[in-house]
Amino acid sequence: MKLRFVLSVFLVTFGIFLVGCKSEDEKVVKSITVTVSDLPNLSLDEKIDLYEIKVVEDRAEPSYDSSFFYKLSIICSSASPVSLDLTELGISTIESSISIFRGCIVLQGIKLPDSLTTIGGSAFSGCTSLKSVEIPDSVTTIGMYTFSGCTSLKSVEIPDSVTTIGMYTFSGCTSLQSVEIPDSVTAIERSAFYGCTSLQSVEIPDSVTTIGSEAFSGCTSLKSVEIPDSVTTIGMYTFSGCTSLKSVEIPDSVTAIGSGAFYGCTSLKSVEIPDSVTAIEWSAFYGCTSLQSVEIPDSVTAIKGGDIQLGFYGAFSGCTSLKSVEIPDSVTVIGSCAFSGCTSLQNVEISASLITIGKYAFYGCTSLKSVYIPASVITIEQNAFKECTNLLSVVFEDIEGWSPQVSNLVETTKLLVLGYSFTKS
């Protein structure tokens, strides 16, 4: 197999032009012809600056095996910077196992052929100079880590043929400011845009039914996001660390807000949880220090907790601006650490259906002054109100059957602040 490589510099085409920079005022231009079979013996005396390498076929049925890609990588590594045009080649797949462009720091742009259907995992990962990529409409699959760590990539247009954005596909693309997700996409998989710190907005089409865990985690510039009605679950840590996210509208289709979904969204001021949600998982809104209000619908049956000793926090732990919360009648359990560290929390309305207040549920809520415990509650677990240093009054609707006894209001309050547990027979 022989292929003819055409390297074009500025307006020069149909030949290989190597531009060596001798000085600011003088350039030496060499024109040579290279075939793939010659590449192993190709030696260059000096580093060359190329604008574009264009590869064209010179035989009817070429074979694009690992040897071809290896030889192609040799040419790419000989020039700096370089843009690669493969539009005239009949390549259908760039295999994950090849990954010859992985870590190619001189590659600035690439044009892919219309024959391509699959871009394998890690194909262009670590190409830190890659600024643009043209993905043809023929591509249906973009593999894991395909463009991860491409720190110069500013924008990308995903064609309508793609149905899934794979795991870590654009993770660590710190210059990526915008991305257009087509209606053909049904799934945004785990960590697809993880750590895209320049991404400011994203519009998720109605075709998407699944947003994987950590899909947009660490997107510190993301200010707004529209979640379509087609999404039923917001996965674990999906928007965690999105420190610029101020508001989010959760559609009625969502039934569960995953663990850590909005963990550390320090600019999030308000959130409206729809009636479709039945569970708010542990750490869902942990560390949302600007969150001032939250409306928990009657559909929620559990506000999940974590384990403070293991570093797993409750649904609203560390929401230091949260001033009041109303627990609906549907909730029977306030999980461990659910509201721990909510230092501005002044008012808690506990429903008449609540059965259990978990360990550390209101630990360190230093602004909480009074609590009313309805007759439905039979268990207040250890440290539920510990370190609530301004808690002066805890009133029990039913004082019978408690151990220890709750008849003495002052003594009971002191014991709760000290972290004692209470059970009712």
Image (tube, rainbow, N blue to C red):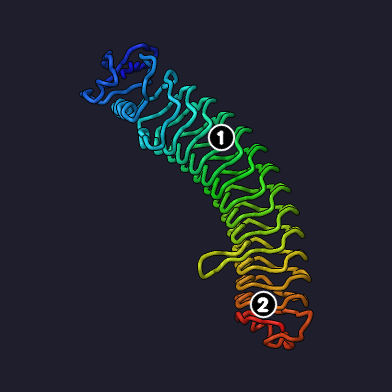
**Residue 302: x, y in percent?**
68, 64
Q: Residue 144 location in percent, x, y? A: 47, 41
Identity of the residue drawn at 60% across and 79% down: 419
Describe residue 322's horizontal placement relative to residue 34 as left or right: right
Question: How many numbered marks does the figure carry?
Answer: 2
Q: Quadrant of residue 111?
A: top left
Instruction: Report whether 212 appears left or right of 79.
Output: right
User: Is residue 124 among the parts visible in the rendering?
Assistant: no
Residue 258 visible to an observer of this rendering: yes
The crowd level at tag 2 (other Cα within 10 Å; few <14, some 14-19, many 20+) is: many
Q: What kind of element bears circle 1?
A: strand
Cβ atoms at labels 1 and 2 below 8 Å apart: no
388, above or below 144, in the image: below
* Left or right placement of residue 284 versus residue 353 in this view: left
- The quadrant of the rendering that contains the C terminus is bottom right
Helix, strand or loop status at disc 2? strand
- Residue type at numbered disc 1: Val
The mark nearer the N terminus, 1 or 2, is 1
Q: Which mark is residue 27?
A: none
Residue 110: quarter of image:
top left
Residue 46, quarter of the rendered image:
top left
Report the Cα–Cα distance between label 1 and label 2: 48 Å
Whether residue 3 sits left or right of residue 249 in the image: it is: left
| Residue drawn at 76 percent across, 84 percent down | 399
Identified at 74% across, 86% down, the residue is: 401
Identify the image quadrant of the N terminus. Answer: top left
Judge whether 6 appears above or below 187 on screen. above
- Residue type at mark 2 is Ile
Q: Residue at x 54, y 25 (%)?
A: 137
The x and y percentages for residue 388 are 63, 75
Q: Which residue is mark 1?
A: 179
* Residue pointed to by mark 2: 380
